[in-house]
Image: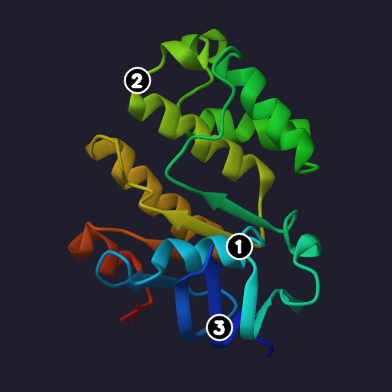
C-alpha cells in the first residue's frame, strides 16, 4: 500500500535558511506517528510541508499520492493542520467560525453539529465571539473545525497546548477515533509520556 507520507531527503527553505534539511519520513495509512526532536529540528516545518504550505525545494515529497514538488495545492483540502495559531476570526462566534471553515473544507452541516458537540461547544459557547474566549476554548474551537472537516491526514502541532486535563484526554480520543474512521495522524507534542501512549510509533528528527 502506498504510504500516506513519503519524504526522501526533503529540503525546505525559509528564506535562505534550511528549515528542513534532508529529512526522510514514511507514514503508513492508519498510523498515529509522533515526531520528536529538539527545537529547530524541523517538526513544525514537516507538518506545514505536508499541508502544502511550505515548498519542498529538493529531494522528494509525496502526501496522499500528491507530489508536493510539482503542485501541493491538491492536497490542501484533504489534510487538516492544527498549528500554533488558531486561524479563527476573532469577531465571529464559535459556531460561525466552525461553519465557515467547515464549508471551506466542503463539510456537511451534520459534521459541524457533531464536531461542536464532541468539543463541548454546542451550548452557550456557540454564540460567544472568539475574541472573548479563553486560550483553551479557542483551542477547542480550532479542534472542532478540524473534526468537522474530516481530513484524511491530521497534522497536529502541540494539540494539547492550553487545554485542561479533560481537554487533553479529549484530544487523545480524537486521534484514536480519527484513525478508527480511516484517517492518519502525524503530530508533535512536548508532553512525551502522554504522546507516546497514544502514538503507534515515534520518529526522531535530529
* Residue found 47% across the figure and 47% down from its top: 83
Q: Is 138 drawn above or below residue 133 in the view shown?
A: below
- Helix, strand or loop at disc 1? loop
Of residues 92 and 164, the one nearer the viewer is 92
Mark 2 or mark 1, which has the lower sequence index?
1
Point out which mark residue 110 bears: none
Residue 100's spot in the image, x, y percent?
72, 27
Q: Which residue is mark 1?
A: 54
* For discs 3 and 2, the disc positioned in front in the rendered view: 3
Check if mark 3's residue and mark 2's residue have beta carbons within 8 Å: no
Q: Which residue is mark 3?
A: 10
Q: Quadrant of residue 179?
A: bottom right
Residue 150's spot in the image, x, y percent?
66, 50
Mark 3 or mark 2, which has the lower sequence index?
3
Q: Indicate how the structure is coloured in the image.
A: rainbow
Residue 183's spot in the image, x, y percent?
61, 64
Work out how far the residue at label 3 is from the one at label 2, CA to CA, in angstroms: 38 Å
Q: Which residue is mark 2?
A: 134
* Residue found 46% across the figure and 38% down from its top: 85
* Residue found 69% across the figure and 34% down from its top: 101
Work out how far the residue at label 2 is from the one at label 1, CA to CA, in angstroms: 30 Å
Of residues 84 and 118, the one nearer the viewer is 84
Q: Residues within 10 Å of mark 1 (few under 14, many from 20)?
A: some
Q: Residues within 10 Å of mark 3 (few under 14, many from 20)?
A: many
81 left or right, relative to 192:
right
- Helix, strand or loop at disc 3? strand
Amino acid at each position: 500500500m502506498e504510504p500516506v507520507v513519503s519524504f526522501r531527503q526533503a529540503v525546505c527553505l525559509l528564506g535562505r535558511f534550511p528549515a528542513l534539511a534532508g529529512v526522510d519520513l514514511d507514514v503508513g495509512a492508519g498510523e498515529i506517528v509522533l515526531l520528536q526532536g529538539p527545537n529547530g529540528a524541523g517538526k513544525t516545518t514537516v507538518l506545514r510541508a505536508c499541508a502544502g504550505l511550505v515548498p519542498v525545494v529538493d529531494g522528494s515529497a509525496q502526501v496522499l499520492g500528491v507530489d508536493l514538488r510539482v503542485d501541493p495545492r491538491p492536497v490542501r483540502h484533504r489534510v487538516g493542520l492544527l498549528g500554533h495559531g488558531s486561524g479563527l476570526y476573532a469577531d465571529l462566534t464559535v459556531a460561525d467560525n466552525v461553519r465557515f471553515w467547515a464549508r471551506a473544507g466542503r463539510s456537511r452541516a451534520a459534521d459541524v453539529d457533531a464536531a461542536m458537540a464532541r468539543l463541548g461547544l454546542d451550548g452557550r459557547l456557540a454564540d460567544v465571539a472568539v475574541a472573548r474566549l479563553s486560550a483553551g476554548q479557542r483551542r477547542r474551537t480550532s479542534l472542532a473545525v478540524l473534526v468537522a472537516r474530516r481530513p484524511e491526514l491530521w497534522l497536529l502541532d502541540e494539540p494539547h497546548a492550553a487545554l485542561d486535563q479533560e481537554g487533553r484526554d479529549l484530544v487523545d480520543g480524537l486521534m484514536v477515533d480519527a484513525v478508527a474512521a480511516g484517517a492518519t495522524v502525524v503530530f508533535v507534542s512536548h508532553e512525551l509520556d502522554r504522546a507516546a501512549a497514544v502514538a503507534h510509533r515515534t520518529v526522531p528528527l535530529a
